[in-house]
Image (spheres, helix red, strand yellow):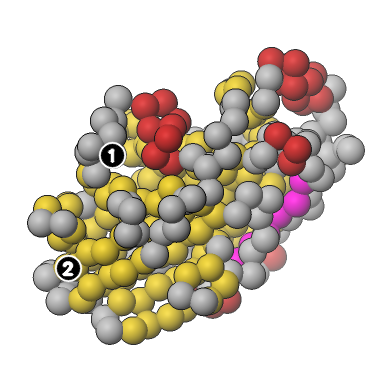
Amino acid sequence: MLQADIAVTTVPRGLDVPGLITRDLADEGFRDRIDPFLVISQFDMTGPVFPPHPHAGFSVATYIFPESKIGFWNQDTLGNVKPVTPGSLYLIVAGAGVMHEETVSRSGRHATGFQIWIDHAAVHREVTPRAFHLAASDVPVTARDGVTRRILLGTSGGVASPVDTPTAVRLVDVEMKPGSTLREPISPNETGFAWIRSGEIEAAGRSVPADAVLFADDGGLTATSESGARLTVFAGRPLRQPAVPAGPFVASNATQAAMFRDRYAKGLMGKLDPFDQGALDRAHDMGLRTGDRKCLQDHSPRSSPASS
């Protein structure tokens, strides 16, 4: 359990299975520190791991780091088949229920990024599912005094992401040049923290290395970096409500969790055939332009949409 007087913690290791290694910051033990986020998983993925699967009751965002060697392919029962290239974000508002699948664009190479579960207020748990693809070239960027911000969700420094979420959160990817200082205001009614991905920062007289999280104090997040660093800022107003995890679903109570399971069992979240990873690998090796539909010429996913 994280104690209230600890401002820095090393992110625990999570999965270590063929094709996937993670570090996970999850609700258990960190609830008050990360609400309205439920799970934040930093992944290093090299192959297909998760077949088509459902989600309901929350939003799930996948962010591929700009420095990632490769990206993902995403498909879902909302009719989307899209590449998620380095620097891009894909958000699914699962709501009443949707099926999706993500896999690497080339097996054997490293796709690195975050998968983020964002809780919904109880009144928004069963909203109509929808998806947003924010291409790397469309991410709002600010650069000042050696600090570059990519505003993926929410607003930072008066600059807003075009992506709309049921729960207002902030997700800002930051690159700090050597000798720079980051100042990210966090209001008193928000939780906020920075996940250091590479390099090292200094805050309140402490060194914070890679794979650690710095939690905001009452004045927000202020840090310097002598050698340079990459980090991601998370912030949002806590919902402070019951959240019942039920595998791939998040519900407000056991009755709603059972309803989500029943909808999935009846096929009401849609159906989705898995990607042909071999076809994606061959397309990648042929050097086809990212996003070219020809990448899927050997794989035409058969899907049926989710039902309301």
Viewer-side residue, 160 vs 66: 160
How far from the left and from the top, in percent, is residue 156?
47, 70
Left or right, 180 with respect to 253, comes to: left
* Region of the chain picked out in magenta, as a range: 129-135
Numbered badge on residue 11: 1
Residue 143 versus residue 238 in the image, above or below: below
**Residue 35 visible in rendering:** yes
Q: Residue 268 in the image: x percent, y percent? A: 84, 31
Q: Nearer the viewer, residue 89 or 106?
A: 89
- Location of the N terminus by quadrant is top left
Query: Residue under circle 2?
Result: 225
- Chain-order first, disc 1 or disc 2: 1
Q: Position of residue 4 (x, y in %)?
A: 28, 34
- Confirm whether residue 102 shows in the render: no
Residue 32, compared with residue 159, is above or below; it is above
In this rendering, the count of numbered labels is 2
Task: Please tell me whether residue 138 is drawn above or below residue 18 in the rendered image.
Answer: below
Q: Amino acid at mark 1?
A: Val
Write down the quadrant of residue 304 in the picture.
top right
Q: Which class describes the residues within 10 Å of circle 1: few (<14), some (14-19), or many (20+)? A: many
Name the element at disc 2. strand
